[in-house]
Image: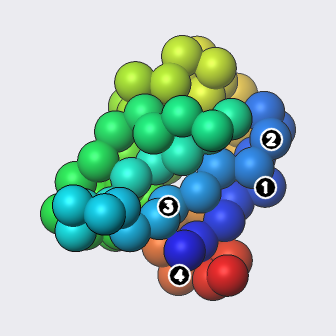
Amino acid sequence: MWKYESPIGPLFIKRLSNGQYGLIYDGTVWEASHSPQVEADNVYMHCTGCYDWDKLDGKVSDEPTDLSEWELC
């Protein structure tokens, strides 16, 4: 599991029971894909389906650019 302390609160990328990796915010899985890197890329691009995060596109200057910048938990 990976964690990013974002301006809206912690975002997590976690392996789900179906084998995919989900983006989790506030207890909700917002999207899932085959790779944690895809999820990290979507966070960076602000295209996650989570409006609270996506609306900050262009307003956050320090979001991680790839999975290596997330905290491994």
Q: Secondary structure at mark 2?
A: strand
- Marks 3 and 4, the one that precedes in the sequence: 3
Residue 56 figure quarter: top right
Dot 3 corresponds to which residue? 13
Residue at the location (44% across, 59% down)? Answer: 40
How packed is label 2: few (under 14 Cα within 10 Å), some, or many (20 or more)? few
Work out whether 13 lies above or below 57.
below
- What element does badge 4 sit on? helix
Residue for point 67% across, 82% down: 73
Task: Check disc 4: other Cα within 10 Å, few if <14, some if 14-19, many if 20+.
Answer: few
Q: Amino acid at mark 1?
A: Glu
**Callout 4 amino acid:** Ser
- Report the front residue among 16 and 53: 16
Q: Could you tell me if the residues under marks 4 and 1 are in contact, i.e. CB atoms within 8 Å? A: no
Q: Secondary structure at mark 3?
A: strand
> What's the amino acid at mark 2?
Gly
The answer to whether residue 10 is visible is yes
Q: Which mark is residue 5?
A: 1
Percent position of residue 24, x then y:
54, 46
Q: CA distance from mark 3 to mark 4?
A: 12 Å
Looking at the rendered image, the disc whose residue lies closer to the viewer, 4 or 2, is: 2
Which residue was labeled with disc 4?
68
Q: Which mark is residue 16?
A: none
Query: Which one is closest to the eye, mark 4 or mark 1?
Result: 1
